[in-house]
Amino acid sequence: MSREKVTISPSIMCADLVNLEESVRKIESEGIDTLHIDVLDGAFSPSMPLGIGTIRALREITDMDFDVHIMSNNNEFFIKEMIDIGVQQITFHYESSTHIDRHLKLIKKNGIKAGIALNPATSLNDLDYVLPMCDTVMLMLMNPGFAADKNETQVDYAKEKVSDLYKMIQKKGLDTNIEVDGRVSLEVIPDLVEAGANMLVAGSTSLFRTERNLSENKKIMEEGIEKGLKLREDN
């Protein structure tokens, strides 16, 4: 039986933003086919690293899958913009969305994978009725938009929440992806994968660790993924 694929989704905001194309080429050269792009409005989350025009320009230089995470108080506007650009997955926040079903259907009818993102303290119970509509559920393991604050740490219940979501998905007989974002470090990757995560947003504590190059960090990530998958199989 082949082992489950775990996707590494490098966060472009953790790369060299002054030399974006060069950063993308380095990621591509490592055989990584997915790029995590945060879309922030400066209100829901207190930063705004990339504008729509920059994302559109990135789309023109690479055929990598764009894994877009919208952190906004106006989800529909950004969803429509990302559909127009041509991305492969869009997740938006439960906390800022009044019309969740409408947004999921809008994304999916355009042939794009749709997902809901949950802040750390948001209960999984809020997914009860919409989980079957989700290709992905993104669990924020720290408060969104505060990654630049080095004192902001991953929540203590990160692994427990991933595990609870994994059990919920299994119970419903679904194949929904579990994406984790927020201090997904080299040290915690085995635990998160063991708990059920199969999409890892890679940032400054993993793929972009400065003491090693991209290739070395990717190798350590892959070793952590394999360890986590083995632990999951053994349990």
Image (cartoon, grey):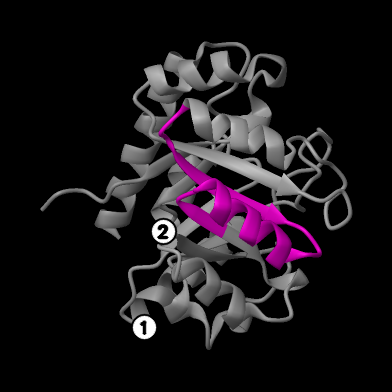
Residue for point 63% across, 37% down? 55
Q: Name which residue type carries label 1.
A: Lys
> Residue 188's image quarter?
top right
Examine the rendered structure and indicate whether residue 43 appears above or below residue 85.
below
Q: Residues within 10 Å of mark 2 (few under 14, many from 20)?
A: many
Write the start and end of the magenta stretch as one range: 62-90
Distance from Cα at disc 2 to Cα at disc 1: 15 Å
Residue 44 falls left or right of residue 142: right
Check residue 76 for magenta coloring.
yes
Please name the residue that numbered disc 2 is placed on: 196
Examine the rendered structure and indicate whether residue 161 appears above or below residue 54.
below
Secondary-structure class at tag 1:
loop
**Residue 137 placement (x, y as % from top left):** 52, 64
Residue 190 falls left or right of residue 159: left
Examine the rendered structure and indicate whether residue 15 appears above or below residue 127.
above
Residue for point 36% across, 31% down? 222
**Residue 235 placement (x, y as % from top left):** 30, 60
Residue 186 is at least partly visible in this image: no
The residue most toward the left is: 1
Q: Nearer the viewer, residue 131 or 79?
A: 79
Say whether disc 2 or disc 1 marks the residue closer to the N-terminus.
1
Please name the residue that numbered disc 1 is placed on: 172
